Image: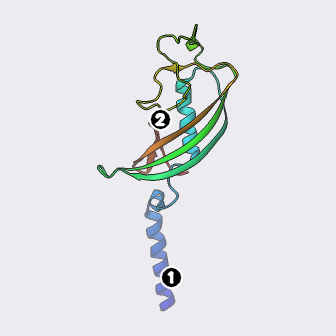
Amino acid sequence: MRGAFITFAVAMLLALLSAIPANAFCMFGCNPTEAHARQIFENLLKQRVDKPFKIVEFKQTMAERLEMHATGEKGYEIFFNARVEFPEGANLECKPEDGKFPEGCSSSSHYVTAPRSSDPAGKQYIAPGSTVLFDEEYRFYEAGSGWKGPDGNVYTAD
């Protein structure tokens, strides 16, 4: 009789667990990943440059959970370094002439993909054959069963 009760209890537990969505089990390890950050980096870089590029290196350097105390909103931040080659350069119309940059182009050599108010505005010239180093961070915000990245897409655990 005791064996039948244990079998029944285990069967009920398994039935209950199978009815719970997979993302409910994400108490640990369901945060945005380095792969998500790399995808966002590629998405945003395509918006900022007009020529082909090659991501030679992409490495997460740090990550941390965040909670905005005023709103209770949960977040996650991924810090990374990337090295990108531009065989043909990029934004060639922004090449400076006599030390002056054309209208709408930035003179800054600080390259970012997700600019904030303090980051360079406008297109940035990248000389053909250049390798550019990026040192950035992306902030994700909890969005239902995933995390909304700075590119506007929602990313979920694979």
Q: Out of 6 and 143, give the one closest to the viewer.
A: 143
Residue occupying the point 35% across, 50% down: 68
Q: The residue tagged with tag 1: helix, strand or loop?
A: helix
Which numbered disc, 2 or 1, marks the residue that appears first in the sequence?
Answer: 1
Q: Give above or below for 43 relative to 156.
A: above
The image position of residue 10, as x and y in percent, is 49, 78
Is mark 2 in CB contact (under 8 Å) with mark 1?
no
In the depicted structure, whether residue 125 falls above or below residue 38? above
Q: Mark 2 points at which residue?
A: 151
- The residues bearing labels 2 and 1 have C-alpha atoms spaced at a distance of 49 Å
Label 1: how many Cα within 10 Å (few below 14, some 14–19, many 20+): few
The picture quadrant where one finds residue 43 is: top right
Q: Return the x and y of residue 44 as percentages of the image width and height.
A: 52, 31
Q: Residue 77, how many percent across, how many down?
A: 48, 47
Q: Identify residue type, mark 2.
A: Asp
Q: Which residue is labeled 1 in the image?
A: 7
Residue 49 in the image: x percent, y percent? 57, 23
- Please, what secondary structure does the residue beneath circle 2 have? loop
- Going by the picture, which residue comes out furthest to the left? 70
* Residue at screen point 45% across, 43% down: 139
Q: Judge by depth and name the residue closer to the eye, 95 or 54.
A: 95
Task: Name the amino acid type tagged 1.
Answer: Thr
In front of the other: 26 or 45: 45
